[in-house]
């Protein structure tokens, strides 16, 4: 119909220069790039793999973009400017201080990449889409629905408005924008079908099967959406939504997923068939390792050039864990999740002299030699501090202090199989589901203390006498640091806007991000979020 109208228009408006007969012109639908409907894809399996790659790489899988917006904007991380490093025109401090604008590249690219996932998934879900490769089309389309729900969930969470294109709309149609309950219903509808059609992969089925969406992964996302639903609607938690969370987590438990045994916490983040990992992505672990480590932590064969010396945690976050507040060597009374740092006697070729968890105090070479900061700074011991005293370069003499300020966080160690280039980042794991269930019970008036103490006992932390909102939030921080949950958690518990180190208290509009200006101009259905 669109092509016919275009031809009629040409015939009516160009009679003088056109010498052919319009009635004789035949155009097949397949000849035109202008189509009435939103075209499907010829190879469903290939397109599903493409979406997986988008999620695993670049802005959605690295240390910037989605990760930075949900971690660096919280009390978990600050990326301090160190001399001439990590300045980047104030980009990282703007995220931490919540002083961003609509032109910040991390916001713009995250928006674009998440929307690319939804649009590609919608093409796959199109009834016209078939496959020219091996694979069950129904299952592959269920994977696409999971990916679309995952991306739409992030868009709703971060911007509260979700562009959506119906498969029956013409290519020229401007996407509608879903908000509030309508957006939630769309996400839940995708997850309902995904849960029905995705494979049931139990905890012991094998590591490779967990790199793709499963029923357990879809149930995990369903629980997460309902736990945060009241935030998206601006209401209070509803018992019915909390029950959905509980039921979804129970379904995950029925698939055999459970908390890792005592002493196995950091094993979860290795490429192993552990009982906690529900969904992992073939993302490069390098950025999760080297963004936080110092330049001097460089060992032959361990990495391709040393640490980047950027991401650092805040003192108050580090001190939320049990153990000696000033050191984190073996035997300092720390709980398992805080990890440990090798000293002169425990540094060796197996650990490369690099600790795991929280790195504080003097750092060592793998032969036990105390390390100094990089050349040109002087013989300044490489001692990571609790406090980040300053975040901006003022003079060359400040460089040594700036380089060593702050405790570092590390869940992925460079000396695992595959080193710092192994492709394995945990996306969903059972401890998150376990804590979501505990929180849902708490919001329904049930005492969550036994569940929290069960987790703490396994992680080597002492039992709590009672658990309220502050304890729930703190426990989620101790368990889920560096796993893209902190911003969501702080918002849900009303703590995202408070002041912390190098950040002042913020206005309510900062709980969501601005929509990139170019997209607002291109789609009149989008409205810039308040305060931007």
Image (tube, grey):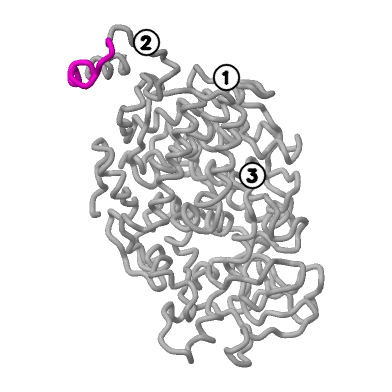
**The magenta segment:** 10-21
Element at badge 2?
loop
Q: CA distance from mark 1 to mark 3?
A: 27 Å
Residue 64 vertical position relative to residue 308 in the rendered view, above or below: above
Q: Earlier in the sequence, mark 2 or mark 3?
A: 2
Q: Which residue is mark 2?
A: 26
Residue visible at 40% across and 21% down in the picture: 32
Is 15 a magenta residue?
yes
**Quadrant including the N terminus:** top left
Residue visible at 67% across and 59% down in the picture: 412
Contact check, label 1 and label 3, Cβ < 8 Å: no
Contact check, label 2 and label 3, Cβ < 8 Å: no
Residue placed farthest to the top in the image? 23
Residue 210 vertical position relative to residue 109 in the rendered view, above or below: above
Q: Residues within 10 Å of mark 3 (few under 14, many from 20)?
A: many
For this rendering, which residue is in front, 330 or 60?
60
Name the magenta segment's main secondary structure.
loop
Residue 97 placed where, x, y %?
Answer: 37, 66
For this rendering, which residue is in front, 104 or 327?
104
Q: CA distance from mark 2 to mark 1?
A: 28 Å
Q: Is residue 291 visible?
A: yes
């Amino acid at each position: 119909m669109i092509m016919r109208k275009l031809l009629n228009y040409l015939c009516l408006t160009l009679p003088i220069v056109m010498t052919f007969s319009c009635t004789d012109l035949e155009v097949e639908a397949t000849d035109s790039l202008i189509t009435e409907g939103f075209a499907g894809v010829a190879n469903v399996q290939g397109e599903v793999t493409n979406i997986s790659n988008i999620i695993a790489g670049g802005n959605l899988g690295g240390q910037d973009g989605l990760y930075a917006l949900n971690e660096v904007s919280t009390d978990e991380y600050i990326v301090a400017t160190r001399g001439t490093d990590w300045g980047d025109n104030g980009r990282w401090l703007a995220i931490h201080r919540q002083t961003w604008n609509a032109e910040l590249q991390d916001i713009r690219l995250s928006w674009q990449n998440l929307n690319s996932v939804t649009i590609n998934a919608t093409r796959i879900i199109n009834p016209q889409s078939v496959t020219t490769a091996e694979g069950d089309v129904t299952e592959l389309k269920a994977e696409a629905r999971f990916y679309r729900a995952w991306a739409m969930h992030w868009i709703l969470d971060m911007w509260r408005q979700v562009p959506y294109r119906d498969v029956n709309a013409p290519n020229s149609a401007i996407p509608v924008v879903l908000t509030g309950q309508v957006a939630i219903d769309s996400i839940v509808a995708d997850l309902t079908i995904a849960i029905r059609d995705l494979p049931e992969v139990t905890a012991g089925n094998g590591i490779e099967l967990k790199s793709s969406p499963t029923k357990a992964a879809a149930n995990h996302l369903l629980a997460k959406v309902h736990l945060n639903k009241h935030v998206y609607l601006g209401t209070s938690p509803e018992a019915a939504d909390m029950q959905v969370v509980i039921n979804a987590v129970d379904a995950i438990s029925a698939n055999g997923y459970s908390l890792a045994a005592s002493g196995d916490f950091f094993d979860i983040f290795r490429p192993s068939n552990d009982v906690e990992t529900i969904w992992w992505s073939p993302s490069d672990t390098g950025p999760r390792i080297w963004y936080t480590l110092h330049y001097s932590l460089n060992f032959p064969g361990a990495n391709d050039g040393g640490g980047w010396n950027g991401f650092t945690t805040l003192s108050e976050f580090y001190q939320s864990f049990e153990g000696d507040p000033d050191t984190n060597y073996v035997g300092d009374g720390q709980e398992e999740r805080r990890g440990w740092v090798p000293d002169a006697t425990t540094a060796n070729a197996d650990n490369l002299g690099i600790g795991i968890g929280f790195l504080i105090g003097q750092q060592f070479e793998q032969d036990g030699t105390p390390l100094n900061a990089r050349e040109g700074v002087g013989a300044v011991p490489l001692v990571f501090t609790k406090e980040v005293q300053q975040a901006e370069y003022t003079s060359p003499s400040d460089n040594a202090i700036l380089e060593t300020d702050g405790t570092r966080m590390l869940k992925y160690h460079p000396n695992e199989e595959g080193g710092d280039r192994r492709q394995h980042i945990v996306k969903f794991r059972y401890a998150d589901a376990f804590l979501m269930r505990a929180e849902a019970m708490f919001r329904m008036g049930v005492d969550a203390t036994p569940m929290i103490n069960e987790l703490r006992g396994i992680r080597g932390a002492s039992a709590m006498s009672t658990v309220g909102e502050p304890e729930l939030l703190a426990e989620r921080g101790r368990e889920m640091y560096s796993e893209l949950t902190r911003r969501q958690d702080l918002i849900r518990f009303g703590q995202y806007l408070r002041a912390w180190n190098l950040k002042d208290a913020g206005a309510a509009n900062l709980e969501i991000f601005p929509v990139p200006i170019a997209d607002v101009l291109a789609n009149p259905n989008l409205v810039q979020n308040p305060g931007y």
